[in-house]
Image (cartoon, helix red, strand yellow):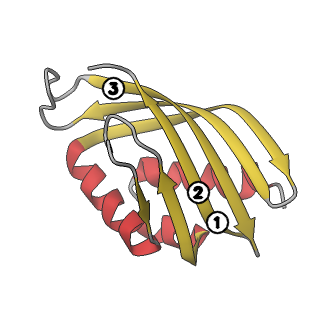
Amino acid sequence: MDLVADLLTPYLRAIEAKDADALAALLDDAIEQHEYPNRFAPAGGVRSKADMLEGLARGAQVLSAERYEIREALTADDRVVLRLGWTGTLAVPLADKQPGDTLTAELALFFTVADGRITRIDNYDCVAPF
C-alpha cells in the first residue's frame, strides 16, 4: 500500500469534500488527533474519531471550501509526515475577514497507520495572520 496515495490523499480529499463517511472509513476507531496550539486552537487539544467527525461538520459551517496541497511527504514504515499548504474560503465573517475571503496556513502532519487506517495524527498548523 502506498500510504500517501492510497490513504492520506483520500483523507485530505474527504476533508475538502466534507464527506464524513469517507473520512470515517479511513480512521481507526481508537484514533487520537493531537493538535498543537495555533491561531484556531490556542490551547491545542486531543480529539477522538467522533470529535474529528463533529469538527468536519462544524468546519462546513465556517468554510465554503478548503484545499490541501501536498508539498512534501516522508514515509518510514508505519509513519508518514506531510508538509502541506492549506487554503480555506470563509462562509462567514471572521475577525476582519468577510465571506469569500481566504485564509492560508502551512501545516506539518505526522501520521501513524496500522492495518490500512490512520491511528494517530499530530498537527502542527502555522496559520497566516488575519
- From the viewer's perspective, tell me whether residue 103 is left or right of residue 29: left
The residue to which callout 3 is attached is 103
Name the residue located 13 percent from the left edge and 20 percent from the top edge. 96
Name the residue located 39 percent from the left edge and 49 percent from the top edge. 44
Q: State the SS at label 3.
A: strand
Closer to the camera: disc 3 or disc 2? 2
| Snapshot quadrant of residue 28 | bottom right
Residue 108 in the image: above or below residue 19: above
Q: Quadrant of the C terminus?
A: top left
Neighbour tally class for label 2: few under 14, some 14-19, many 20 plus, Cα within 10 Å: many
Name the residue located 27 percent from the left edge and 41 percent from the top edge. 63
Mark 3 or mark 2, earlier in chain: 3
Q: Nearer the viewer, residue 113 or 59?
A: 113
Residue 36 in the image: above or below residue 51: above
The residue to which callout 2 is attached is 121
- From the viewer's perspective, tell me whether residue 43 is left or right of residue 13: left
Q: CA distance from mark 1 to mark 3?
A: 27 Å
Residues marked 3 and 2 touching at CB (< 8 Å): no
Residue 72 image point, x, y percent: 72, 31
Residue 36 image point, x, y percent: 46, 46
Q: Quadrant of the N terminus?
A: bottom right
| Snapshot quadrant of residue 100 | top left
**Which amino acid, mark 2?**
Ile
Residues marked 1 and 2 touching at CB (< 8 Å): yes
Q: CA distance from mark 1 to mark 2?
A: 8 Å
**Which amino acid, mark 1?**
Ile
* Picture disc at residue 61: none
* Picture disc at residue 118: 1
**Which amino acid, mark 3?**
Leu
